[in-house]
Amino acid sequence: MSNTLLESSNQWIKSDLEDSKRTLQRHKLADRIATVVMSLAALLLVLVLLSVISILLYKGLSTISWKFLTSAGTFTEAGGGIGPQIFVSVYILFLSLLFTTPLGVGAAIYLAEYAKPGRLTTAIRFSTETLASVPSIVFGIFGAIVFLTIMGLGYSVLSGALTLTLLNLPLMVRIAEDAIRAVPNTYREASLALAGTQWETIRKIILPAALPGIITAIVLTGGRIIGETAPLILTTGTTISPNAQYSLNPFQTGETLAVHIWVLKIVGVPGLKDSQAVADGTAAVLLLIVLIVNIGAAYLSQRLQKNQRGAR
Amino acid sequence: MVLKKAIFIQSIFFTAAAILVLASLALMIFVGSQGLHVFSYMNPLEFFTGTTWDQNTETYGVLPLLFGSLATALITLVISAPLAILVALFMVEVASPRVRQLMRTTVELFASLPSVIYGLLGLVIVVPWVRESFHTGLGKGILAASIVLVFMTQPTMVAITEDALRALPKTLREGAWGLGATRWQMIWGVLLPAARPGILTAVILGMGRAIGETMAVQMVVGNITARVPKSFITGATTMPAAIVTQLPEATSPEHRAALIMVGFLLLLITFALIATVRLTTGGAGVRR
Amino acid sequence: MTQLQQNDNLLTKSLPNPELNGDLSPEIEARNFNFYYNYGHFKALNNINLTVPRHKISAFIGSSGCGKSTFLRAINRMHDRTPGTSSEGQLLFEGQDINAITDTTDLRKRVGMIFQQPAPFPLSIFDNVAYGMRLEAQRVPKSEIADRVEQALRAAVLWKEVHDKLDQSGLALSGGQQQRLCIARAIAVEPAVLLMDEPCAALDPIATLKIEDLIRELSQNYTILIVTHNMEQASRVSDFTAFFTIDENRAGTLAEYGPTKQIFTKPRDRRTEDYITGRFG
């Protein structure tokens, strides 16, 4: 009697153990599948990125040549280039940074060095965050209303640069403010204790120390400017006047590299024989510029971290 | 004397900061007032419930645009959110530090690609694929736009989700390990529920990004504004796409006002999404 | 009269304010001085009365949070940077009310400060020491700067170690050297007073002893106030010691002040005795 009881309870324990073993195996299997799935997701992104870069370079590199980069576009003949578009892109980049940098760094200095907690400071921060969340097309609309029409600047490089200034201001302020705040407080206190004024402290110690961070801010902002399209379509236009191809006149219409791609592919330039090749070449150029800017910014921020660690 | 100079310098910097405030106010005021101007030409009901947007007949019903934007955003989310969560989980829980850095670089590069390049690739790869797979039309439409947007929204969502996961206290993980959980059990049972506010933030902000995206969408969505699209593979439009297509050519004041009103609507929707984020998560670290 | 006898004279004359005689003219005086943080909500210092004599080393000791550093920083108006601070009573420098001064740069020309964390600027050694002299408040003619840099570095006992590498970054020096650089920087502008806020707290023992020697040398030409956590340091280095403690309302107050020898051998206040013998703090 007791034998069978012992046997059956043994069997019961055994099957219980086997059950737990099976559940454990199930969980382990689920874990392994999950790990594979997560890795595949990450792999997907990497592969897509690599394919994207490869496809663009494959399609476009063959079109790029010195002639392509320096000569003007044609209306019908094949073999035209994107020289003027590159010029306009650089011009808008330069003009826009010219406005954005002092405004952004100035506001950042105010926020980091002068502002006292209170409603005014809260309002400034709230405005910065608000501007940061506005879609770029709405900046384009604003630019079209205020710069184009009300201020009468028309479709122009200037209108575009001003619009992009507003668009990039929050980014510049944020990164510059971070860079300025990262300067150790001990420097400020030491300078003040030596009878330095606040402005002297900022000018002689803080800004030089924050410079790498501010330069990173400028580079990152520049990277964004190069890629912006919608606001420029609405404020700078989509054409370059043939007489004003390398003109420094800020009131002329213009077409940046990014806009040019859109014009070739969507708006279309009927009759242009190699419009697709030009579009592909432009895209490859744009991609290369973006990659270089990113590498530059990454290199700068690495140097920045090294310097800061050395300063402790 | 010294004091005067100090005050002068401070006021220069203050002016720079004040310009920020003025600019954001001006944006709201100008876009808002010029947009609302459309209601002097037509009544709001027609605008908000009309299913046809046709500049030739000066009929401006916003539903095709609104539907396009929302449908695109939703389909994008359905694919993009799980993908982003998986990638973020990989980065935080599975990857070695070197691989993690590689993934971060990858995600950042996705973020820095210009919109037109996404659009170009969409035209060259996605649209033909939709065309071949579904054997209808041109291939342009909400589906094509959503596929492109999946990759454009990855940076935002992955970054915020990664932050949310990393912010979870170590004790959470240690507790699960201590109980003998597998990694997936820990992730599914403990981490994801705990990171829900952050993940929600990521999803909502990703949606905002998708709704506000202009060029890439415009290049693959088909730009048919005349009616609410019947399927995801026929030509459609979204709010930003319609604006960038039509505003440069819009000559009649009614047309312009209607388009600006669409822009204002877009702005309000974006602000509503951000307000939702703040309210539901108490502003869980939104920095990107 | 030896130093010790002079100090003993002080002991017998009055408490807690050592009375003044010609040799011990006050540089800094606090009279019923109260200090508040957070718009009056937190009283950090309660009724401080003390006199810091000229060209002597006065140490402020006491456990953390007693307000020693707060008091020190009130002297060169460093609290101006912090919103919500205020004070009552008088804090005098050379007879003038410190809080009534409108242009603090004047004050800071005469009252220098050394911080706990050596903070040389990310500039060359030469430029560090010259920094103060190049400021608008100091207006030192360019031709004099190089000489005064050398003087200051010699006085800080750093010249021999750095004279051949003046263009190197100040950050490349060791901790002790950096602190001596900061001292050189402070004395290059020839202040009357040096405020030192735990100057050796971040340094190793050897560097600390070097700095203590330096402080004793400097006291021949400067009035020195030093806040320190280290009682042995206070007893080694200072001529006068003020012991701060926390009263019932968590405000810092002066328990006792007198010549160092007296404080450490025959403290008058029970709290001082407890602290010194290590019963708390």
Image (tube, helix red, strand yellow):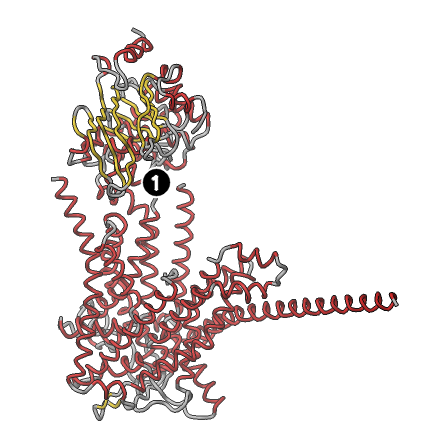
Quadrant location of residue B187?
Answer: bottom right
Find residue C164 and report its horizontal and vertical position in percent. 37, 29
Find residue C2 and report its horizontal and vertical position in percent. 32, 8
Quadrant location of residue A152?
Answer: bottom left
Can you say whether A279 is above or below C85 in the image? Answer: below
Residue drawn 37% across the image and 63% down it: B288
Towards the viewer: C75 or C32: C32
Can you say whether B12 is above or below B225 in the image? Answer: above
* Secondary element at image label 1: loop
Q: Which residue is mark 1?
A: C122
- Give the amino acid type for the residue marked by disc 1 in the picture: Pro
Find residue A72 and report its horizontal and vertical position in percent. 28, 75
Query: Which residue is farthest left?
Result: B1
Would you say residue A208 is visible in this rendering? yes
Quadrant containing the N terminus of chain A is bottom right
Would you say residue C139 is visible in this rendering? no
Can you say whether A13 is above or below C69 in the image? Answer: below
Residue drawn 33% across the image and 77% down it: B215
Find residue A12 and report its horizontal and vertical position in percent. 78, 68
